[in-house]
Amino acid sequence: MVQIEKALTILTTYFGYPSFRTGQEQVIQGALQGRDTLCVMPTGGGKSVCYQVPALVMEGTVLVISPLISLMKDQVDALHQVGIPAAYINSSLSTEEYFGTMELAAKGKYRLLYVAPERLDSPAFKNQLRRMTIPMIAIDEAHCISQWGHDFRPSYRNISSIVSLFDEKPVVLALTATATPAVREDICRQLGISEENTVMTGFERANLAFSVVKGQNREKFVKDYVRKNEGEAGIIYAATRKAVDSVYDLLLKSGVSVAKYHAGLGDMERQSEQDRFLNDEASVMVATNAFGMGIDKSNIRYVIHYQMPKNMESYYQEAGRAGRDGLDSDCTLLFSSQDVQTQRFLIDQSQDVSRIPAELEKLQSMIDYCHTETCLQKFIIMYFGETDVKECGRCANCNDTRESFDVTEDVQKVLSCVIRMGQKFGKTMIAQVLTGSRNKKVLEFRFDKLSTYGLMKDRSAKDISDFIEFIISENCLSVENGQFPIIYVSERGKDVLLGKVSIQRKGTVVTKQITKDDP
Ligand code: ADP
């Protein structure tokens, strides 16, 4: 109790915050009581305080493992400004600086020592650590330890051996914004944290309004959007450097004060473009996902994804850069089915073949997000493992006033077609059979003889394709990712076929339905 009071005093005197945010107190209290903890908070949730404050209560030097060189420097600078002795060790230091820092560290001069994970590979460094008093090891971006995370780093695997270096085991505090159950479990298992010592809070962002926009001309959408929000700060994320260049040119030509950022630009140009945006000289930043890590710009009013990103983790992290100041902000994703092919292609090119199945599974959740008709914020938070989530009332789906129709019968048609085709095919082929296509492959497999052939021939193959995506997002069909994605009927789908579950869809009716106006 006394210690947490001391922590609060430190929070106010050093950091200038009047109170802890949700979750912070619990994490800090746990750490001070010697409990290994996993802290899961979204970007901007306030994770740094969770190890910086205990560092001022505990005796010795808190070791902070962080993969982001620029972030380390920023944090150490900020700590110096408020009079907290801290230092960092990473590849940006000269040999002299390194030895100088380590000498002071050995004398216990720092409250916090930030270290890049690669450093933990060095036996000499480990020896030096052993001579220090380290009451706690904070592991920032802890998802990097997991193959299931979106940013696996092999050197993170060394962390557990560091923990066992010391006679008196330091408290382990793992921090991440990635909250998928598989990643959480993996972090806990590898770092020996009991899963019940997970503190997960604040995934809802009450000032963000999400929307997914389909079937629109993206260039026109972006131009109109930026014009409508003239002067407001916004980020537009595009999937490739080429796309960044072209959106940038487009906006520049329409007179927008725009900056751009991608790995193809030189260091100097990247830095100056970033600065222009951070200093409000350019209102819009067009960038690949290379932009944004460690950026603390609070007044971003919107984040547009020009293409669908590869998974929900990336999406929420990038979209979550909007509205850090708590004011209402928009997160819009422009979806085209072409994006799915692009992301699948990128995953197939991945270096580590063993990760492909997990990546494809994550991609599928991202696709489901683009097709779901439930609350988008709720979909995201539930993806990250929170249960008992209320609808946000702000997102495009919550505000979709179109009427809902019972589409159970149409879903049943699709499901029974999938079963009759042997559950061995993908979306395109299923749509072709349902719309009665004379495509060579359809005839070759004699699918024109099935009772479900042409059952939805009054609709376009594209509509049926979209409808299949909707059914997948409703968990009635599942996707198995082999060489080609194969669609099969899930347990819930079987319940729909048996008439135990009914399915509603907003606005669009697939085949002719009895509506209220019909007699
Ligand atoms: P994360 O590491 O989770 O992305 P940060 O630690 O960078 O988040 O904190 C995000 C922002 O929240 C920072 O601008 C920080 O100053 C602010 N912040 C953190 N804790 C508090 C608090 N208790 N009260 C008010 N602001 C806070």
Image (tube, rainbow, N blue to C red):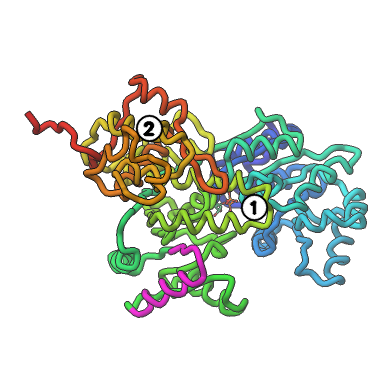
Residue 404: x and y, percent? 24, 35
The residue closer to the viewer here, 367 or 464, is 464
Q: Is residue 249 magenta?
A: yes
Seen from this angle, which residue lies furthest left?
519
The answer, for residue 113, to whether it is visible in the render is yes
Say if disc 1 is inside 8 Å of ligand 1.
Answer: no
Q: Quadrant of residue 502?
A: top left
Q: Of helix, strand and loop, which one carries label 2? A: helix
Q: Quadrant of residue 427?
A: top left
Cα gap from disc 1 to disc 2, whole angstroms: 36 Å
Which residues are drawn in magenta?
Answer: 236-253
Q: Is residue 397 left or right of residue 237?
A: left
Which sits earlier in the primary sequence, circle 1 or circle 2?
1
Taking the spot 53% from the left edge, 35% from the top edge, the residue there is 385
- Disc 2 designates what residue? 415
- Disc 1 designates what residue? 151
Which quadrant of the rendered structure holds the C terminus?
top left
**Label for residue 80?**
none
Q: Is residue 361 magenta?
A: no
Q: Is residue 435 left or right of residue 383?
A: left
Q: Is residue 107 left or right of residue 348?
A: right
The residue closer to the viewer here, 365 or 196, is 365
Magenta span: helix, strand or loop, mainly? helix
Q: Residues within 10 Å of mark 2 (few under 14, many from 20)?
A: many
The answer, for residue 53, to whether it is visible in the render is no
Residue 347: x and y, percent? 58, 54
Taking the spot 91% from the left edge, 54% from the top edge, the residue there is 123
Q: Quadrant of residue 373?
A: top left
